[in-house]
Amino acid sequence: MPQLLAKIYVHLIFSTKHREKMIPRHLHPELHAYMGGILRDLGCTAVEINTEPDHAHLLFLLSRTVTMGDIVRQVKTGATEWLQGQLPVLNANGNE
C-alpha cells in the first residue's frame, strides 16, 4: 500500500494578556528564535514567526506526534517565561 504524506500548515495567533503592548521591538528577533526552538523541539518546522507589541503570529508545519493543544500550551508558556526572564518588571506586575 502506498504511503500517504501530508503537510499541514498552521497559522497560530495569540495575544498578550488584555492585549497590552508588552513585547518590546528590540526583543523580537530573540523571541522569534526562542519560539522557533520550542517548535523544533516539538517536531514542528517553523516557516515564519512575527510579533507585534501585543500579539504573535507563528506559521509552522504541524508535527504528526504532538497535539495542537500541547503545541499552543508549550509555545505560549515558554514565550511568557522567556519574556519574564528578559523583563523582570513583568514578573513584578503579575502580568503574563
Image: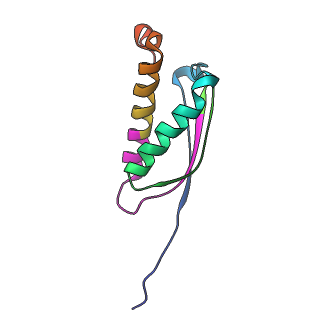
Quadrant in the picture for the C terminus: top left
Q: Is residue 64 magenta?
A: yes
Q: Is residue 95 visible?
A: yes
Q: Position of residue 51 (x, y in %)?
A: 61, 34
Q: Is residue 30 magenta?
A: no
Q: Is residue 96 visible?
A: no
Chosen colour scheme: rainbow
Q: Position of residue 78 (x, y in %)?
A: 40, 33
Relative to residue 90, is residue 10 drawn left or right? right
- Which residue is outermost to the bottom? 1
Q: Residue at x 39, y 92 (%)?
A: 1
Q: Residue at x 38, y 49 (%)?
A: 41
Residue 69, compared with residue 88, is above or below; it is below
Q: Which residues are magenta?
A: 56-74
Question: For residue 27, what is the image quadrant?
Answer: top right
Q: Residue at x 45, y 16 (%)?
A: 95
Q: Position of residue 90 (x, y in %)?
A: 46, 14
Q: Residue at x 58, y 34 (%)?
A: 29
Q: Position of residue 65 (x, y in %)?
A: 35, 60
Q: How many marks?
A: 0
Residue nearest the observer in this picture, 17 or 21: 21
Residue nearest the observer in this picture, 45 or 4: 45
